[in-house]
Structure formats: C-alpha cells, structure tokens
C-alpha cells in the first residue's frame, strides 16, 4: 500500500497509513499503533486480520518478506522473472517481483504454484519449469531436511542487532540441524555494500519509470499559467514526500556529473554480490538469516528518521540485487509479544528448496499465535 511501493512502513499511501493488527503486550510500544511493514503491508495486514485467505504482494527490496515478518506470516519473493509483472506499476524494473503472502507454508506453496508462469507480455518473464512445490512440502514433512547444507552468513551479524534476533537466528539453526540439515558458516563479503547499491539503483530506475506521470500522459494534473509551470506543479503535487525523495536521489545519481561515480559503481557492486551468492551456493543449498533487524515499530517513526528506515531492508535487499528467491517464516515473538521471522535464501529457480526448509522451520517453531486485531 505504500505509494508506488516506496516505503518500509505503509505510511506513504495516498489513503492514509495501514495499521498492523498486532499490538505490543509490553514495553515502550504497548498501546501504540504499529506498522505492518512495507510496501506490501496492506496485503500482510489483511492476512494477519484474518480477512482474506491469500494475498499477493510485490517485492523490490523486501516488500513481501518484511511485512510477512512483522505480521506473523509467510512471504515468498520468487526468482526474478518467475511471476509476471504485467499490469504492475513499475518501481525498479530490474528488482520488482510479485509473490505470495500467506498464513502457512502449505498455502504459500499452493499460491506460488498458481502464480508462476511464463508471460510473453512481460519482457522480464523467464520460461523455466517450476519445481513441484507440493512434492517439496510433502518431502520435508515426511523426511525432514536430512543432509541439506545450510549456510549461516557471517556478514548478516550486524552492529546493534537486538539480542532476541540473534537468539532466534541461533534457534533456527538448531531447528534445522535437529531435522537433519548440516549448517556451516559462509561468507558473502560484499553484503555490506548491498544497501548503498540498492538505494542508488532502485531510485535511479524509479526516477525513469515515474517520469511518465507528468499530468499530460498519466497521473494527476495541476494547471499552471505556462506548460513549464504545469509540469512543475504537477510533479510537486502528484507525488508524496517519500516518492519525491527517491525521484530526486535517482535523478541525481543519473545526472551527467555523477552517473559514473554512483550508478555505474552500484551496478558493479551488484555483480559482485551476485558472484558472492553464486560461489556460496556451490557449497550449500540455502542460507539462513533473520528476516528483519527488529520487530514491527510504531507508526510515525519513519517520518522522524527516514534514513534509519532504509536499514530495515538490510537482510532482504541482497536477494533482490541477485535476483534469487527468498522466504520469510514466522518463528517466534519478541519480548513485547510481536512476531519475528527467519529468512531462507536459495539459488535461482530453487523455490522448492525454500519450501522444504520453510516447512521444517514452521514445524519446529510451532508458531500458532494470532494478532489481537484478527477477526474472531
């Protein structure tokens, strides 16, 4: 619901903020309205409220997985090109991907199977066979994940990460090992550059994609005394603050004096990140990480410090830059009673590996909590 899918808190919608059905049971967030995450927080909120059986979302830098984690749901970002983007308003065309948000892994496997297909109307769609996700689910339930090699990336341990996130991550590793997996430390050395690269590439693509909304061909029009004045007023009034912020960043990094210094370097970093994943996946089947660096936060925090909000994507952005699939699974509650998720990342086109690992995490975690704002 964030405007043009830009945001991590669902506060940038033209129709007002979306409120998370979950509420804190204790601590400084008790009694406060919380974000459902973004940008697909509307889909996550309606699922957490038990008002829908299934919901689609789009994920450019974590916009399926972060809301799923904040709302106690399963959210899967497929391989880039796995699901058609036809009809989706583009944010960052080389990163955007549609995927399912569901209440459990079985529903996720079923919905993902239905969503995945080749579409000649989408130039980024890939014509590749979809693994049998229901068979992967059945295999995990019957046989566990015996001998599956799971990498634990060193670089996902970040400064200031809450102890409860670290503890849950370690618990997830233990759950997988108990189910027969082999967990090993791995290194993704260019991870620290993922966020800066993302916040150059994504705004650059957004500034180009949103140029069409000029009040002449598309979008809201604000009249002016001259054509130039009409364009200026329309661009100012037609977008919210977050969208304008990202358009300005994108325009800046694509400008003649800074294109090589920022955009080209960011694309080079992206390739190095892709290479890191490719190398790691030669030795492991999947990676286990936290989904987010915190539980849901209070509405309004993004306005106070928009830069810190960008850090909410720290664990999710690398998979988008690499174009590989990732899934968030609810795995526990924070000290104040809010959902926390664990993320699995797999090689391109291996959504079946994600379903296998996610099914085991789901079984071990036994997450059966329901939001206080859910329909009875």
Image (cartoon, rainbow, N blue to C red):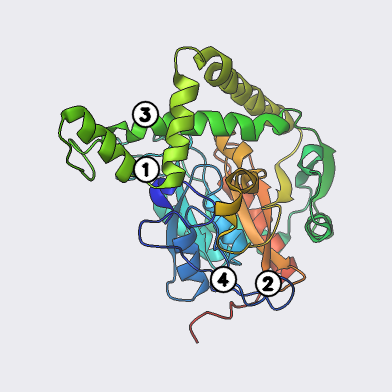
Kindly report the distance in space between the C-alpha atoms of the residues bearing marks 4 and 3. 35 Å
Q: Residues within 10 Å of mark 2 (few under 14, many from 20)?
A: some
Question: Of label 1 and label 4, which has the lower sequence position?
Answer: 4
Q: Are marks 4 and 3 in contact (CB under 8 Å)?
A: no
x then y, percent, for residue 269: 63, 23
Name the spot of residue 187 as percent of width and height, x first.
Answer: 79, 33
- Residue 298, percent across and down? 61, 64
Q: Residue at x 62, y 45 (%)?
A: 313
Drawn side of residue 319 relative to residue 46, left or right: right
Circle on res. 33: 4
Element marked by disc 1? loop
Estimate how packed mark 3 is, as few (under 14), some (14 to 19) or many (20 or more) residues with alpha carbons within 10 Å.
some
Q: Residue furthest front?
A: 225
Tag 3 residue: 208
Q: For the view shown, which residue lies furthest in the bottom direction?
A: 376
Of label 4 and label 3, which has the lower sequence position? 4
**Residue position marked by numbered label 1 in the rendering:** 84
Q: Could you tell me which secondary element the residue under label 4 belongs to?
A: loop
Q: Earlier in the sequence, mark 1 or mark 3?
A: 1
């Amino acid at each position: 619901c964030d405007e043009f899918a830009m945001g991590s808190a669902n506060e940038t919608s033209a129709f007002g903020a979306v409120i998370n059905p979950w509420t804190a049971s204790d601590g400084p967030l008790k009694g406060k309205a919380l974000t459902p995450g973004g940008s697909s927080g509307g889909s996550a909120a309606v699922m957490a409220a038990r008002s829908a059986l299934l919901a689609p979302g789009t994920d450019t830098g974590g916009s399926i997985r972060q809301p799923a984690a904040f709302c106690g749901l399963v959210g899967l970002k497929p391989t880039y090109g796995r699901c058609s983007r036809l009809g989706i308003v583009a944010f960052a065309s080389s990163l955007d991907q549609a995927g399912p948000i569901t209440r459990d892994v079985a529903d996720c496997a079923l919905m993902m199977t239905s969503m995945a297909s080749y579409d000649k109307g989408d130039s980024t769609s890939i014509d590749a066979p979809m693994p049998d996700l229901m068979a992967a689910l059945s295999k995990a339930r019957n046989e566990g994940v015996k001998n599956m090699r799971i990498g634990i990336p060193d670089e996902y341990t970040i400064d200031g990460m809450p102890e409860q996130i670290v503890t849950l991550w370690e618990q997830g590793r233990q759950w997988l090992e108990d189910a027969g997996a082999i967990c090993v430390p791995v290194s993704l050395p260019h991870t620290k550059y993922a966020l800066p690269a993302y916040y150059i590439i994504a705004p650059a693509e957004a500034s180009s994609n949103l140029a069409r909304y000029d009040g002449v061909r598309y979008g809201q029009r604000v009249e002016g005394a001259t054509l130039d004045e009409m364009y200026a007023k329309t661009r100012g009034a037609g977008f919210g603050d977050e969208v304008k912020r990202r358009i300005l960043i994108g325009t800046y990094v694509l400008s003649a004096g800074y294109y090589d210094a920022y955009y080209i370097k960011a694309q080079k970093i992206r390739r190095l990140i892709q290479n890191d994943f490719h190398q790691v996946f030669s030795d492991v089947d999947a990676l286990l990480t936290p989904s987010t660096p915190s539980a849901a936060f209070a509405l309004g925090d993004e306005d106070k410090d928009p830069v810190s909000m960008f850090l909410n994507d720290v664990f999710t952005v690398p998979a988008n830059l690499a174009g590989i699939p990732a899934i968030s699974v609810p795995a526990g509650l924070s000290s104040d009673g809010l959902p926390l998720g664990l993320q699995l990342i797999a090689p391109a086109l291996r959504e079946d590996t994600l379903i296998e690992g996610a099914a085991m995490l789901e079984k071990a975690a036994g997450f059966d909590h329901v939001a206080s704002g859910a329909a009875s």
